[in-house]
Amino acid sequence: MTGAATEIARLIRPDLRGRSPYGAPQLDVPVRLNTNENSYPVPEAIVRAVLAALEDDVRNLNRYPDRDFTDLREALTTYLEKQSGVTVMPEQVWAGNGSNEVLSHLVQAFGGHGRTALGFTPSYSMHPIITETLGTAWADGLRESGTFELTAEKAAEQARAHHPSIVFLCSPNNPTGTALPFEVIGAVLEAAPDAVVVVDEAYAEFARPGTRSALTLLPGNPRLVVTRTMSKAFAFAGGRLGYLVAAPELVDALRLVRLPYHLSTPTQTIARVALEHADLLLATVEAIKGERDRIVDGLAGMGLTPVPSDSNFVLFGGLTDAQATWHALLEAGVLVRDVGIAHHLRVTAGTPQETSAFLEAMARLAGTHRQENT
Ligand code: PMP
């Protein structure tokens, strides 16, 4: 270690010493299917609408943005009503720079020293990272042994055991892809009476028909929070806009922890204009779902074990050595994600060409990389 590195290691909070930051590789390869982005670029009509709307914004950048992002909240309620059929008031909506920021606001407001957040591994890796870096203890809940499933009984049992202040559920779940059984949410609300229950629905728009959103449970449940993002279905990961829906009183509490003017004027405008064109931006969702299903069928046909998906990605198992397959795919120009689950990799559904490139590369590798007897 250099002198400066030793000095920083001495000064940093002891619980952060030796930790690694979140870091999915951002490599410049032809086919990037590792961060569950939407592969389709923003349509030209929206590019022009955004640029026109930004012109006025730039002129007024001498002023702070609207602290309460009033127009954006309205736009989000209109979208949510159309997408889910649930009526939401603007005062029930909170937004941040990606749903990661919204999640951090929740932990800042409802976690803290001496408190615990519970999640069910494997799930979104940022839930424990946000929790622990904000000084809240993390309890790693378990799924049914040998599977990625979470039943209402198993979830409730652990919610009772850990007395959490926050419970993270993720539906559809990243990295497994499958939506939770709906009854898990109600069971956890009942079993953890002192917890805010967060249902991370980052991938809701990709769910298979009949999958119910936790938004439908909001009336009468003031401790329930549903988080969503424009990073996935909306093809807006670079715009950094995530949001949540909850009781107005809970949303009001988040104003205590956000930094003043946390959503820049351009962020608010870009997201609002994108929402005005929601139909056009979401036009790729059905195509992506088709590619996802093609991945599931293709991998199963190769003797691998894909997990059923309600998302824009597929987790698949049956590999002898996931890291070796990850490297071999990279050599073939295809970047996927090693999520740290033995014998498994995760791949995002891309354009038909990208999906074909992945499936063709995987078909070439399957014979030598497949675990026998799976
Ligand atoms: N939740 C889940 C389950 C995710 O997979 C992601 C992104 N990978 C996020 C939240 C955060 O996304 P963003 O900050 O871009 O909204």
Image (cartoon, rainbow, N blue to C red):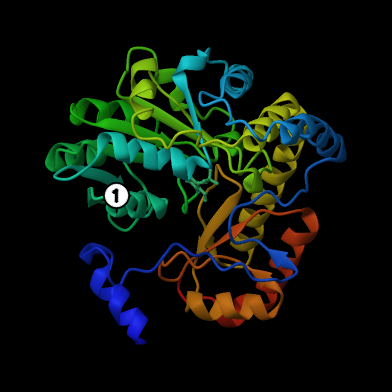
Q: Is mark 1 within 8 Å of ligand 1?
A: no
Q: Nearer the viewer, residue 201 or 97?
A: 97
**At x 58% / y 38%, what residue is drawn?**
241
**In the structure shown, which secondary structural element does the residue marked by tag 1 occupy?**
loop
Give the image location of residue 102, x and y in percent.
44, 37
2 versus 178 height, above or below: below
- Within 10 Å of disc 1 (Cα), the crowding (few <14, some 14-19, many 20+) is some
**At x 67% / y 35%, what residue is drawn?**
61
Q: Is residue 308 visible?
A: yes
- Of the 4 image quadrants, the one containing the N terminus is bottom left
Q: Nearer the viewer, residue 79 or 152?
A: 79
Q: How many numbered markers are drawn?
A: 1
Q: Nearer the viewer, residue 213 or 299?
A: 213
371 relative position to 349: left or right: left
**At x 36% / y 34%, what residue is drawn?**
198
Q: Nearer the viewer, residue 311 or 10?
A: 10
- Amino acid tagged 1: Leu
Quarter occupied by residue 274: top right
Give the image location of residue 97, x and y in percent.
53, 41
What residue sits right under mark 1 in the picture?
134
267 versus 93 height, above or below: below
Q: Is residue 178 visible?
A: no
288 relative position to 321: left or right: right
**At x 32% / y 58%, what residue is drawn?**
146
Give the image location of residue 49, x and y in percent.
82, 31
Give the image location of residue 153, x and y in percent.
23, 36
66 relative position to 159: left or right: right
114 versus 86 height, above or below: below
